[in-house]
Amino acid sequence: MVRSLILVAAFLSFTLTLAAQQSHKHPGLAPTQQIDGSINPEKIPDLTAYRLFFLVASTPPNPKPAELVRQSAQVDKIALSDEDHQLLISILNEFRVEYTDLIAQYNQAAKAAVAIGKIPDSKAFLVTRDNLVQATRDKLKALTQNGMSQLDMHVQREKRHMKSIGPATN
Amino acid sequence: MKVPTQLLFVLVFAGVCVADYTPQYDSYWTFSFDPETSTASLNVIVDGTTTGDCYIGTYYISNCPAQHSPGIENVINSTNASSNGPSQDMFSYMSYEIDNSAALPVGTDYYTFQIEATIYCATAGANIYDTGYVSGSHGSPDDIPLNQFSGQCYTNYNSSNITAAHAYWNNTSRTPGCWWDAPENESYPTWVCTDSNVNAVPTCLQTNTNKRCAYQQIFVNSACNAVTSNMWRNTPR
């Protein structure tokens, strides 16, 4: 029994050292998969695509003139009616405020946790984040049916300019 | 109780080889063009975090959580807005965007671009996420004026307030479209695009009351089939 324990301890020590040496660059990194939207746009989840579109097409509060011009040019690509155009901009900017606040709150808590040696629950935060994106998508139902269709077509097309890394699925 | 050596090895091995954190980042780049100011824009964003913890089994990974920092390359022609963002621990959430705009010479709408989005891990000493370098050109340098889609547009909506209109290729709907000058209170007319011969042109429906005079010239082949071009050209108001 003692001999077995000694062998196990030796093996344990060897394995940990080897793991540390071999995975010096990414110790503990789980397998990931990359999705390239230019090759497989259908693999970019809709929630991801809408989140990225919301972020890029929105402006922060008190936008500068150049930011307004950029936003207008972005939304113009969707070819909405004037009413849908204005409504979409309003929803986008509301999302930006909520998203910024959500991240700020989480990061403050995360920093505090790390400072006392705890690990923040970033996985739970991702669920909260996605809930916000979905809630914003639900607000888009206020657009006309044609507007919603145009918007969705636009977001689906924009997936070709998106890339994603996340947990491996196989 | 005597525990078999083999079982001890299995139990220990299972405990030390479980990896425990996963980077989850997304990136997106998109173009836009404002014909009124002849300004091209390119937005690049990287957004996400790392999930998990700092343990491999019961072993605590040294220098964990690592510091991650975003980097974005964003260049339009010679206008370079590339930048690196502040570093933060990997379990914090990162949303970093660089917007770039460049005024193009009036009458041109062709520009080159380069983008790349990365997340650098200080512990790894390498990028843990990299879109790869993407470069290319947007628009077309050629100005071939002929095509049947630059002809007249007419409407089945009666209004004496609609003035000049121009045919264009709608890159969003991938169909011919029309832009027109119209007073603000004209809303939702239905336009039909046609060439001067009123023949063999796919119909389009355009409900946009945008007052811009921009249009997109397209190339056509000898069979008069459209070969798309992302070209905008301001017309004088």
Image: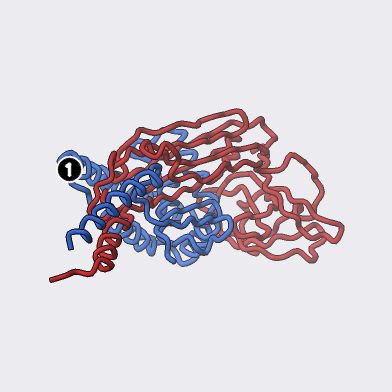
A41 to the left or right of B141:
left
Name the residue: 78% across, 58% down: B195
Q: Which residue, as the protein is rendered here, is positioned at the far front?
A: A3
The chain containing the residue under callout 1 comes to A
Q: Residue visible at 21% across and 48% down?
A: A119
Tell me if B61 is positioned left or right of A167 in this view. Answer: left
Of B197 and B106, which appears nearest the observer? Answer: B106
From the image, tell me which residue sits under label 1.
Answer: A117
The N terminus of chain A, quarter of image: bottom left
Secondary element type, mark 1: loop
- Residue for point 42% across, 61% down: A168
Chain B palette colour: red
Quadrant occupied by the C terminus of chain A: bottom left
Query: Is residue A167 visible to us here?
Result: yes
Q: Which chain is blue?
A: A
Q: Nearer the viewer, residue A22 or B148?
A: A22
Q: Nearer the viewer, residue B93 or A116?
A: A116
* Horizontal arrangement in the rendering, residue B175 relative to residue B124 (left or right): right
Q: Position of residue B109 (x, y in %)?
A: 66, 38
| Residue B53 seen anywhere in this rendered image of the structure | no
